[in-house]
Image (cartoon, rainbow, N blue to C red):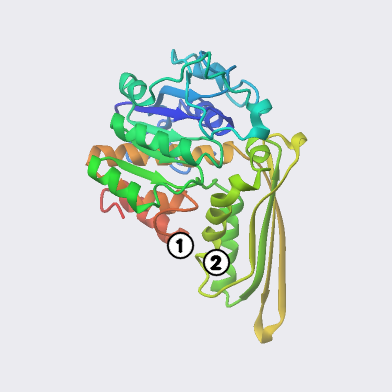
């Protein structure tokens, strides 16, 4: 199979886990019955090793100019190191700062000085690298930055994968832009393989399927990576709270008191994320039932395998000439897709998409 040429905007912990994982699974052939950590060892004929990184953009001064394989381990990145990717020959380019760094994050991100470092022309850099797909991994709350990169991808003729909670793929205006350009777009806000959102959704669906009336629910999340530090600024959290909340409440046909979202930054946890889910309901005869659950995961690797599937689905869409929002893979892999679909149904749609039967 031809390589899938991918560019990354924001070379943080999530990007580190993705790059490491592609090398970690380099020997997967697709003939195995089971591969630990992969939802799809082969996806429409494409293996993880078919993904290659041809461009990367970041604002942290210490990452700029370094090979991607080196930059993914530069502070403030703190995710677990589980592979040692070889040099890619691709150096990290300076991107525009815009709203990609909150004031309280300037010490952690240590951005380049725009008076001394000229950000590159992103669209031109994408064209020169021959990138087919651009992944948006900017920090939560990057409203302007996310839309800048979405437009740069359009200008360069790239598909776009939006992994953060900025509503781009779910915005009809952007859907139409990509449809007219003949390019696919997937998003918004990546789910983890087994993370807080997917687990909360499964539990809520279980309650509903078993006749339990949900009275109230909350999901509290704490962690120690730069994502959680960034989200200490509540103004950057608006779309994140909406995305995570709608992912759960979209399953309900009646209003339920709900509170979901990041709760605190605990530096010593580093990339470990701890989630507490509470659900209270009424059982047979109106008798109370209560569930409290704790989930602990290494945050960034938990989403990387999902992104590997989305990248391969987007490549297939490019080959098939599918444009606009990819509803099947978006509904299965993102918290705020253009259309919320029950997880089992979304999974079936993805399998049908792989088989070429349908996109949606």
Q: Sequence-wise, which precedes: disc 2 or disc 1?
A: 2
Query: Is 65 above or below relative to 158?
Result: above
Q: CA distance from mark 2 to mark 1?
A: 9 Å
Tell me the quarter of the picture where residue 242 sits: bottom right
Judge left or right: residue 84 versus residue 324: right
Q: Nearer the viewer, residue 313 or 267?
A: 267
The reply to whether dot 2 and dot 1 touch (C-beta < 8 Å) is: yes
Q: Return the x and y of residue 29 as percentages of the image width and height.
A: 40, 31
Q: Nearer the viewer, residue 47 or 323?
A: 323
In percent of the image, x 52 and y 35: which residue is there? 138
**Secondary structure at numbered mark 1:** loop
Q: Callout 2 environment at 10 Å: few (<14), some (14 to 19), or many (20+)?
A: some
Residue under pointer 1 = 342
Question: From where the camera sits, is residue 35 visible?
Answer: no
Tell me the quarter of the picture where residue 219 sits: bottom right
Query: Is 5 above or below relative to 212?
Result: above
Question: From where the camera sits, is residue 286 visible?
Answer: yes
Q: Return the x and y of residue 152 as percentages of the image width and height.
A: 36, 32
Judge left or right: residue 42 versus residue 78: left
Q: Return the x and y of residue 193 as percentages of the image width and height.
A: 54, 46
Residue under pointer 2 = 205
Q: Return the x and y of residue 153 as percentages of the image width and height.
A: 35, 33
* Outermost residue to the bottom: 285
Q: Nearer the viewer, residue 129 or 208?
A: 129
Q: Quadrant of the N terminus?
A: top left
In percent of the image, x 31 and y 55: which residue is there? 360
Q: Nearer the viewer, residue 265 or 22?
A: 265
């Amino acid at each position: 199979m031809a390589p899938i040429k991918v560019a990354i905007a924001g070379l943080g912990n999530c990007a580190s886990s993705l790059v490491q994982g592609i090398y970690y699974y380099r020997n997967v052939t697709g003939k195995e019955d089971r591969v630990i950590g992969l939802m799809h060892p082969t996806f429409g004929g494409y293996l993880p090793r078919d993904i290659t990184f041809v461009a990367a953009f970041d604002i942290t001064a210490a990452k700029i100019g370094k090979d991607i394989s080196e930059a993914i381990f530069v502070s403030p990145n703190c995710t677990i190191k589980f592979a040692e990717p070889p040099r890619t020959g691709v150096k990290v380019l300076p991107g525009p700062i815009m709203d990609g760094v909150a004031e309280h994050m300037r010490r952690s991100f240590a951005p380049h000085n725009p008076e001394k470092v000229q950000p590159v022309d992103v669209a031109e850099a994408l064209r020169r690298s021959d990138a087919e797909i651009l992944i948006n991994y900017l920090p939560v709350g990057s409203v302007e930055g996310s839309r800048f990169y979405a437009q740069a991808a359009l200008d360069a003729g790239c598909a776009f994968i939006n992994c953060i909670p900025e509503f781009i793929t779910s915005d009809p205006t952007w859907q139409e832009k990509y449809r007219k350009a003949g390019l696919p777009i997937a998003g918004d806000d990546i789910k983890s393989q087994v993370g807080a959102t997917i687990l909360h959704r499964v539990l809520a669906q279980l309650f509903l399927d078993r006749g339990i009336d949900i009275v109230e629910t909350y999901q509290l999340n704490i962690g120690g990576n730069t994502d959680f530090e960034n989200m200490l600024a509540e103004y950057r959290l608006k779309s994140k709270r909406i995305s995570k909340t709608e992912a759960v409440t979209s399953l309900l046909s009646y209003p339920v008191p709900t509170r979901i979202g990041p709760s605190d930054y605990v530096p010593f946890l580093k990339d470990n994320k701890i989630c507490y889910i509470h659900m209270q309901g009424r059982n047979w005869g109106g008798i109370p039932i209560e569930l409290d659950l704790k989930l602990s995961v290494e945050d960034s690797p938990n989403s990387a395998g999902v992104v590997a599937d989305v990248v391969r689905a987007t490549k297939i869409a490019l080959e098939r000439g599918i444009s606009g929002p990819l509803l099947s893979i978006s509904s299965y892999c993102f918290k705020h897709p253009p259309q919320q679909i029950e997880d089992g149904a979304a999974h079936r749609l993805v399998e049908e998409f792989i088989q070429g039967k349908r996109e949606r």
